[in-house]
Image (tube, helix red, strand yellow):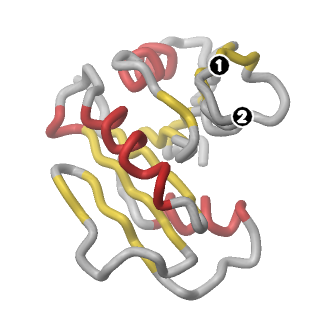
Amino acid sequence: MLPTVTWITPTYRRPQTTPNLIACFLGQKYPPELLSLLILDDAGQYGEDCRGDRWEVVSTKFRFPSLPAKYNALVEMTESQVIVVAEDDDTFLKDHTRLHVLALLSQQSGGFSKPSTVLTDYPGHLVTEKADGRFHGSIAFTRSLF
C-alpha cells in the first residue's frame, strides 16, 4: 500500500513562483487521492481562500522567526506519512514523488531520501545542479523520522 504524501513549501514574497510549483505538483505520477501540497506564506500576500485541487496556500502576516520554524509548522499542518520538501523556485519532474516513495520504501533509506541532482530556475533560467550543499528542497522523509 502506498503512503500519503504532502509536499511542503515555505514561501516569502515570491508569488510569481507559485504557478510553476503548482503545475509541477499537479503533474506528478502518483495517485492523486494520496497526494497534497501545502504552501506557507508568511508575507500575507495571498487571499484567505487560495486553494485548488489538492493544494492550499496558508497565508499569514505573522513572520516566522526562521526557515526551520516554518518547516516545523508545515509538518504540523499535515498528517501525511511522507513529507516532500518542495522549494518554490525549483522544477520537479513528473516522477519526483513516486521516486521518493520508492526510495523511502527501501530497507536502506532510514526514512530519508535525497536525489543527487536537481533542476532549478534560481539563477533565472532552468539549470541542473548537484543537490549537495544548499539544496534542501529536494529531500523527502517519513513522518516517523521527523
Identify which residue is drawn at 42% across, 44% down: 7
**Where is residue 80 drawn, in percent x and y?**
36, 48
Q: Pick the quarter of the image with the N terminus.
A: top left
Q: Amino acid at mark 2?
A: Pro
Residue 98 in picture, x, y percent from top left: 36, 19
Left or right: residue 59 versus residue 10 is left
Q: CA distance from mark 2 to mark 1?
A: 8 Å
Task: Check the image and report above or below for 145 versus 48.
Answer: above
Mark 1 residue crowding within 10 angstroms, few (<14) / some (14–19) / many (20+): few
In this view, the residue in front, 27 or 68, is 27
Which residue occupies 65% across, 82% down?
63
Q: Which residue is mark 1?
A: 127
Q: Residue extending furthest right?
A: 133
Looking at the picture, which amino acid does disc 1 mark? Val
At 49% from the left and 49% from the top, the residue drawn is 17
Q: How many marks?
A: 2
Find numbered disc 1 in the image and state the secondary structure of the residue it sits on.
Answer: strand
Label 2 Cα crowd, 10 Å radius (few <14 / some 14-19 / many 20+): few
On the question of residue 81 being in view, the answer is: no
Dot 2 corresponds to which residue? 123
Q: Nearer the viewer, residue 83 or 129?
A: 129
Residue 56 image-quadrant placement: bottom left
Closer-to-camera residue (100/3): 100
Question: Circles 2 and 1: CB distance less than 8 Å?
Answer: yes
Residue 75 visible in the displayed image:
yes
Residue at 53%, 47% in the rendered image: 88
- Side of 40 where 50 appears, left or right: left
39 or 71: which is nearer to us? Answer: 39
